Image (spheres, rainbow, N blue to C red):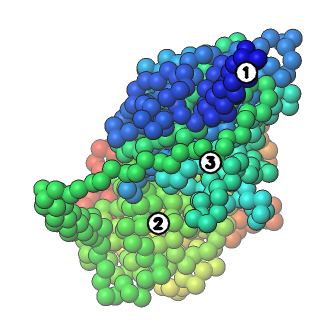
């Protein structure tokens, strides 16, 4: 009788032990439940510690540090191809809380399944104490992590500073989502702030049969004073993340499970308040009535020195703000005169252009020359632009010049580069154009370092496009517009490789029936008509002459003047005339075309180019006749190869603005003058 009574008492004691202390029940690697981590068999390092209250604290007030806590015994997984899918299934449930510093979110933490617990070389901050720059994204890591991240890191390609991600061997998540939970009552996702200082419950479940990993979040309801807290939290019916993944390619036969946390320049206290795990089935649901409260925050006193330091800091910031304001004002200073008010729609602020070009960085540079530099940019509206910065000192004639710039902005033709506006600063003028993604025609014809090819049909389309633009400038707009610098480098190509005439820096306007009065000859050697170089006469015929030189250079793939050629080929128009007289006109065609061209079209372009190069202006065709011939609506007039002439610049002070060295050797040189004596 006594023995039976002792046996009954022993059974009652054992049963009571397991009932009141479930945290010590089933402490093996395959299944466990912890409410008091003092009774857990954990391996911890770094900042991680177990508080006297039984909470697991991963991080503290240390900066740039890490903390780890792993179950001491590994979980055995069968990753062989013959194993059942259930051998990789697992489920875990834990309660966590992030208590950040005031105004800061801090860094994040992660639930980790890893082949090793040695993270001594792992970095904090965005690496979450798991990897470093050299080990990140290595298949030999064998790490699966569910990150709870409160810091947006560009290196990790994070989507926000409040997200949940699934990571495999890398800090870059294969899938992530902003932190939220699905409300069964409201039927929608509700945002959930991770670094809220509140307790949050998470479920992580992997189904080996479907090879599907689910991650689900939910807040722990705040207990009302007159209502008991539910012992089991209701799990949302929809997970936050659901990702197919084959863990047999990641897991080894023995894997450790635990947590990793980190801090950066700002810090937060990261806590684990309860943890349940099971391999091969559903983990036991945590009893919310046994989840402890968070420890109260330590009192923070402000000593007098802190107050003095704060006042000094405010004064310093005010002074710094004033200095910054003055610096920014000077940095973005412009010249804006009263007469410019009427042009305000075409004027862009320097600050806008500065930001559009990222401060005129060298990486945004498109090209440079005697005229200045051209930068690529993007306006806040998303419009891509090209910004030309032109140096100038003279203010004389500026009003008329700006007036012409505004007039250029009114020009509308599909084969003109659109001038969008301008800006003036002391010592420089900025012109804003549409951005042409394929650069200049000059690059396609002559750049040997970056060879680009244009077939004949593309070249012919470009020639016709430029001819159409010049007809518009000469005859179809309200005033006569002389471009005065037609050449391959001023023909820009859009995304469809259509030619657009640009660079109106030398262009001039005059009313119909009047002549342009210029006191200084400007242009580019090889494109300047004889009457321009000899007498300074600028008319539509001089543009026609330059267009003829342009047609010849496109067809022949040679510049109008090339000192590297043999003497008889140095001046293109004279060489073509020589070949034409001998009946060998096609010998001049660009070798890069490799004979693949329409003979009739090429002959027409060469003859029209020579016709435009006639010495006497009245012997040259007008742009309307040229376009009609190019479009096959008129025949090419008979030409004389004897009368083609090359405009030789004068070296006198009254002649064109060129350097003596370029004139002496007839080198290819652009002469750019923005204010020609007005």
Q: Give the residue number, with chain letter if any, for mark 1.
A: 5
Residue 289: mark in rendering: 3
The residue lying at 29 percent from left, 75 percent from top is 335
The earlier-in-sequence mark between 3 and 2 is 3
The residue lying at 58 percent from left, 84 percent from top is 478
Question: In the structure shown, which secondary structural element does the residue marked by tag 3 occupy?
Answer: helix
Q: Give the residue number, with chain letter if any, for mark 2.
A: 432
Density class for disc 2 (Cα within 10 Å; few <14, some 14-19, many ≥20) is: many
How many numbered circles does the render carry? 3
Which of the pair 115/466 is nearer the observer? 115
User: x, y percentage for residue 378?
Assistant: 51, 60
Which of the pair 112/491 is nearer the observer? 112
Residue 252 in view, yes or no: no
Above or below — where is 309 with respect to 247?
Answer: below
Residue 618: mark in rendering: none
Above or below — where is 477 with respect to 75?
Answer: below
Residue 507 in view, yes or no: yes
The earlier-in-sequence mark between 2 and 1 is 1
Residue 590 lies left or right of residue 335; in this view the side is: right
User: x, y percentage for residue 657?
Assistant: 32, 59
Farthest residue in the front direction?
1
């Amino acid at each position: 009788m006594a023995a039976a009574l002792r046996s009954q008492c022993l059974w009652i004691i054992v049963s009571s032990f397991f009932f009141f202390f479930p945290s010590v029940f089933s402490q093996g690697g395959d299944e466990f439940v912890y409410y008091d981590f003092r009774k857990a068999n954990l391996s911890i390092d770094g900042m991680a510690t177990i508080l006297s209250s039984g909470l697991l604290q991963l991080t503290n007030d240390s900066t740039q540090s890490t903390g780890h806590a792993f179950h001491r015994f590994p979980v055995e997984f069968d990753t062989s191809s013959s194993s059942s899918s259930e051998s990789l299934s697992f489920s875990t449930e834990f309660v966590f809380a992030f208590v950040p510093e005031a105004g800061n979110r801090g860094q994040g933490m992660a639930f980790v399944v890893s082949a090793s617990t040695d993270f001594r070389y792992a970095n904090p901050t965005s690496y979450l104490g798991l990897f470093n720059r050299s080990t990140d994204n290595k298949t030999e890591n064998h790490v699966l992590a569910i990150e709870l991240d409160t810091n947006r890191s560009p290196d990790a390609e994070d989507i926000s500073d409040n997200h949940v991600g699934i990571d495999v061997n890398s800090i870059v998540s294969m899938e992530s989502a902003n932190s939220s939970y699905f409300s069964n009552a409201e039927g929608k996702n509700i945002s959930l702030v991770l670094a809220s200082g509140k307790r949050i419950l998470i479920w992580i479940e992997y189904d080996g049969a479907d090879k599907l990993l689910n991650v689900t979040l939910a807040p722990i309801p705040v207990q009302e004073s007159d209502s008991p807290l539910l012992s089991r939290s209701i799990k949302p019916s929809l997970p936050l993340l659901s990702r197919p993944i084959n863990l047999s390619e990641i897991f080894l036969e023995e894997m450790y499970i635990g947590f990793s946390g980190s801090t950066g320049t700002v810090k937060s206290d990261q806590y684990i308040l309860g943890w349940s795990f099971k391999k091969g089935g559903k983990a036991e649901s945590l009893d919310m009535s046994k989840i402890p409260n968070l420890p109260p925050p330590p009192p923070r006193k402000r000593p007098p020195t802190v107050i003095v330091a704060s006042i000094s800091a405010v004064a310093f910031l005010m002074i710094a703000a004033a200095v910054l304001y003055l610096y920014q004002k000077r940095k973005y200073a412009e010249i804006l005169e009263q007469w410019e008010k009427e042009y305000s729609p075409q004027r862009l602020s320097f600050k806008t252009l500065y930001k559009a070009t990222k401060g005129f960085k060298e990486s945004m540079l498109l090209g440079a020359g005697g005229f200045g530099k051209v930068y690529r940019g993007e306006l806040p509206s998303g419009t891509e632009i090209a910004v030309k910065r032109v140096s100038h000192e003279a203010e004389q004639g500026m009003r008329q010049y700006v007036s012409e710039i505004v007039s250029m902005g009114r020009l509308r033709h599909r084969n003109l580069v659109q001038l969008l506006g301008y800006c003036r600063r002391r010592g420089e003028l900025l012109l804003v154009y549409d951005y042409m993604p394929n650069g200049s025609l000059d690059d396609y014809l002559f750049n040997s370092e970056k060879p680009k090819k244009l077939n004949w049909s593309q070249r012919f389309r470009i020639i016709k496009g430029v001819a159409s633009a010049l007809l518009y400038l000469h005859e179809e707009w309200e005033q006569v517009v002389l471009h005065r610098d037609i050449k391959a480098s001023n023909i820009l190509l859009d995304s469809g490789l259509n030619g657009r005439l640009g660079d109106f820096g030398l262009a001039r306007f005059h009313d119909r029936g009047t002549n342009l009065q210029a006191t200084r000859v400007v242009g580019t050697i090889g494109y300047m008509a004889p009457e321009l170089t000899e007498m300074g006469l600028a008319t539509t015929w001089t543009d026609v002459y330059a267009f003829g030189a342009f047609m010849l250079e496109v067809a022949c793939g040679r510049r109008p003047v090339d000192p590297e050629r043999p003497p008889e080929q140095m001046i293109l128009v004279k060489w073509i005339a020589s070949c034409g007289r001998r009946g060998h006109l096609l010998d001049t065609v660009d070798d890069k075309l490799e004979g693949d061209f329409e003979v009739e079209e090429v002959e027409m372009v060469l003859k029209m180019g020579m016709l435009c190069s006639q010495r006497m202006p009245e012997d040259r065709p007008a742009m309307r006749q040229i376009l009609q011939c190019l479009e096959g609506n008129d025949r090419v007039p008979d030409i004389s190869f004897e009368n083609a002439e090359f405009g030789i610049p004068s070296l006198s002070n009254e002649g064109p603005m060129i350097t003596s060295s370029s004139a002496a050797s007839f080198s290819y040189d652009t002469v750019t003058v923005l204010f020609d004596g007005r």
